[in-house]
Amino acid sequence: MPVPRVIKKYPNRRLYDTELSRYITLSDIHDLVMNGTEFQVVDTNDGEDLTRSILLQIMLEEESGGQPLFSPKMLGQIIRFYGGTAQGLFGRYLEESLSLFAQQQEQLLGSLGKDPMEAMTELARRNMSILSDMQTSFLKAAGFRGPKDSVD
């Protein structure tokens, strides 16, 4: 597993890329994300990991300009999960769902040139199976038993 690139955040809010030995901007970090580069943003004062807050800042900038990804209704739904018993499950569910979505995009691009109906049918079959397995896994993690787990 590659070692993440270290970005230092100084008290003056400047970001320093230790690999390039130069100051960078949020736009540069956006480019790192888009290129799939693993990185970690660290506060120079106390060594705190600031990666999540920097990524959220980038998302806020993206949401503020152009066409937003999240509707107010969706943001409200996400906020309601904070502090609830399902918060951890919901985070895992979103992460798994986004990974699945990315995989499907790659598979769909890989099926270009094939019969489109056949490719979409196969993708739909795979989706149903994966989503069913994922739902069962999350429900079990939440303490629910499925029909196959019932006590005789």
Image (cartoon, helix red, strand yellow):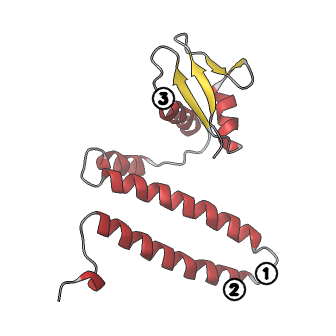
In the image, what residue occupies the spot 55% across and 15% down? 13
Mark 2 element type? helix
Instruction: Give the quadrant of residue 90.
Output: bottom left
Q: What's the distance in space between the residues labelled 2 and 3, CA to CA?
A: 46 Å
Residue 39 appears left or right of 53 = right
Residue of label 1: 114
Mark 1 element type? loop
Instruction: Give the quadrant of residue 115.
Output: bottom right
Total numbered circles? 3
The answer to whether marks 1 and 3 mark residues whose Cβ atoms lie closer than 8 Å is: no
Mark 1 vs mark 3: give the one in front: 3
Give coordinates of residue 93: x percent, y percent: 42, 59
The answer to whether marks 2 and 1 mark residues whose Cβ atoms lie closer than 8 Å is: yes
Residue 13 or residue 21, whichever sits in front: 21
Mark 3 element type? loop
- Which label is found at residue 142? none
- Mark 2 surroundings: few (<14), some (14-19) or many (≥20) residues within 10 A: few
Q: Name the kind of residue labelled 2 in the image.
A: Glu
Q: Is the residue 105 above or below the residue 86 in the image?
A: below
Q: Which of the two discs, 2 and 3, labels the residue nearer the N terminus?
A: 3
Residue of label 2: 118
Residue reaching furthest top? Answer: 12
In which quadrant of the rendered image does the C terminus lie? bottom left
Give coordinates of residue 97: x percent, y percent: 50, 61
Q: Is the residue 25 above or below the residue 137 in the image?
A: above
